[in-house]
Amino acid sequence: MYNSSMNQYVGQKVTPKNFIPKLINRLRTILLEFLLLLLKLVGFIPIHSLRKIIYILSGINMPFDSNIYMGANFFNPSGITIGHDSLIGTNSFLDGRAPLTIGNHSSLASEVMIYNDEHDINSPDFGNSFGAVTIKDYVFIGPRAIILPSITIGRGAIIAAGAVVTKDVPDFEVWGGIPAKKISDRKLTNPQYKLGRPMLFQ
């Protein structure tokens, strides 16, 4: 599993003292990168159930009644949890380097990108800054929206297409723009719908 300790030796000069830890860190990183390559290839299998089994075996915590459409990409699948009856759209990107939690009956449209790690641009070593992302139940995120680290998207919230979310979104609000801001309130405040089965061969 990827965590911030894997960056501990990055950029350090090799010494007899840190040679073994740096070697172990490098090997772990290469193995994770190979796993991500395999998962990228798995994303092109046009059968939901087969992809789902492989994703679960790779460490993604998801029930069998949720679905990830073709072309999805991941960082650290073991950090990703998906609730019941949720859909992840085509060519989406899910980052599990810090915890990523997606609730029940939530829908992410095509090419949504969720990041929970970013570079600290003021750090002398351009280091990483991790922050968990939580998406609650009955959320809809429109195509090509970007969710940045340390964000919570509240129950029933709507994120417009192309939005860049840089701060928490309260329950049942509609947000859009760059950076995303509140547009309106969602009139449906007691959702009980189910998203149903996904399109076959997608």
Image (cartoon, rainbow, N blue to C red):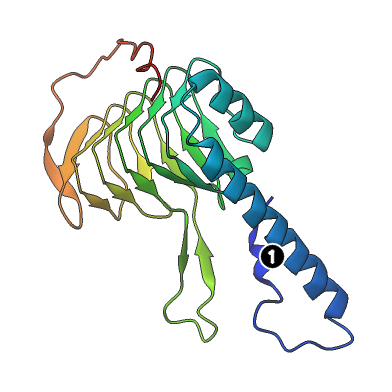
Residue 34 left/right relative to 133: right
Q: Is residue 93 above or below residue 8?
A: above
Q: Residues within 10 Å of mark 1 (few under 14, many from 20)?
A: some
The location of residue 124, given as percent across then percent down, is: 52, 87
Q: How many marks?
A: 1
Q: Nearer the viewer, residue 74 or 178?
A: 74
- Residue depicted at x 59% and y 49%: 36
- Residue 76 visible to an observer of this rendering: no
Q: Secondary structure at mark 1?
A: helix
Q: Is residue 189 above or below residue 93?
A: above
- Residue depicted at x 47% and y 45%: 73
Residue 176 left/right relative to 49: left
Q: Nearer the viewer, residue 73 or 201?
A: 201
The amino acid type of the residue labelled 1 equals Met
Residue at the spot of label 1: 6
The image quarter containing residue 199 is top left
The image quarter containing residue 155 is top left
The location of residue 176, given as percent across then percent down, is: 16, 46
The location of residue 3, given as percent across then percent down, is: 65, 57
- Residue 20 visible to an observer of this rendering: yes
The location of residue 54, given as percent across then percent down, is: 63, 30
- Residue depicted at x 83% and y 89%: 15
